[in-house]
Amino acid sequence: MIPVWWSFLLASVGIIGILATAQHRWWGFGLGIAAQALWVAYALFTGQPGFILSALAYTCAYGYGVVNWLKKEMVDDTV
């Protein structure tokens, strides 16, 4: 069994990713997506498949966010 502190560590990584994206830091998206890969591993090891669904949703949200952010950056660079 995985110790309980792992879920707190994983949540902390995700929260840092969210805060970084809120501050318009490019690496926040990558950290957020990486955190979701860790959540999938956690879900598989603990037999909690609901976390896989939430990780997929968060990954889609981060992906959508990074695509929009990159589009905006490209427009801003051309102006």
Image (cartoon, rainbow, N blue to C red):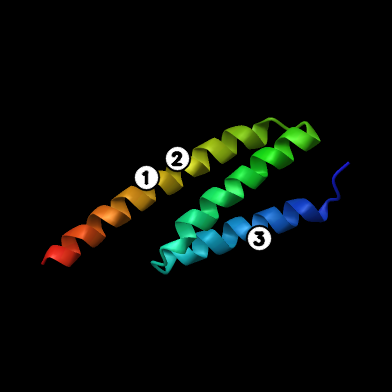
Asked if 46 appears above or below 17 in the picture, the reply is above
Amino acid at pointer 1: Tyr
Mark 2 Cα-neighbour bin, 10 Å: few <14, some 14–19, many ≥20: few
Q: Is residue 55 left or right of residue 9?
A: left
Residue at the extreme left: 79
Q: CA distance from mark 1 to mark 2?
A: 6 Å
- Who's the residue at 86% across and 50% down the image? 3
Instruction: For label 3, count other residues whose C-alpha is less than 10 Å away and answer few (under 14), some (14-19) or many (20+).
Output: few
User: 47 left or right of 20?
Assistant: right
Is there a contact, CB below 8 Å, between mark 2 and mark 3? no
Instruction: Give the mark nearest the N terminus, 2 or 3.
Output: 3
Look at 48% across and 61% down and name the residue there: 28
Residue position marked by numbered label 1 in the rendering: 64
Q: Amino acid at mark 2?
A: Cys
Q: Which residue is mark 2?
A: 60
Classed neighbour count for the residue bearing mark 1: other residues with Cα under 10 Å, few (<14), some (14–19), many (≥20):
few
Circles 1, 2 touching at the beta carbon (< 8 Å): yes
Q: Secondary structure at mark 1?
A: helix
Q: Residue at x 53, y 36 (%)?
A: 56
| Residue 79 percent coordinates (x, y) | 10, 67
Residue where numbered disc 3 is placed? 12
SS at mark 3 in the image: helix
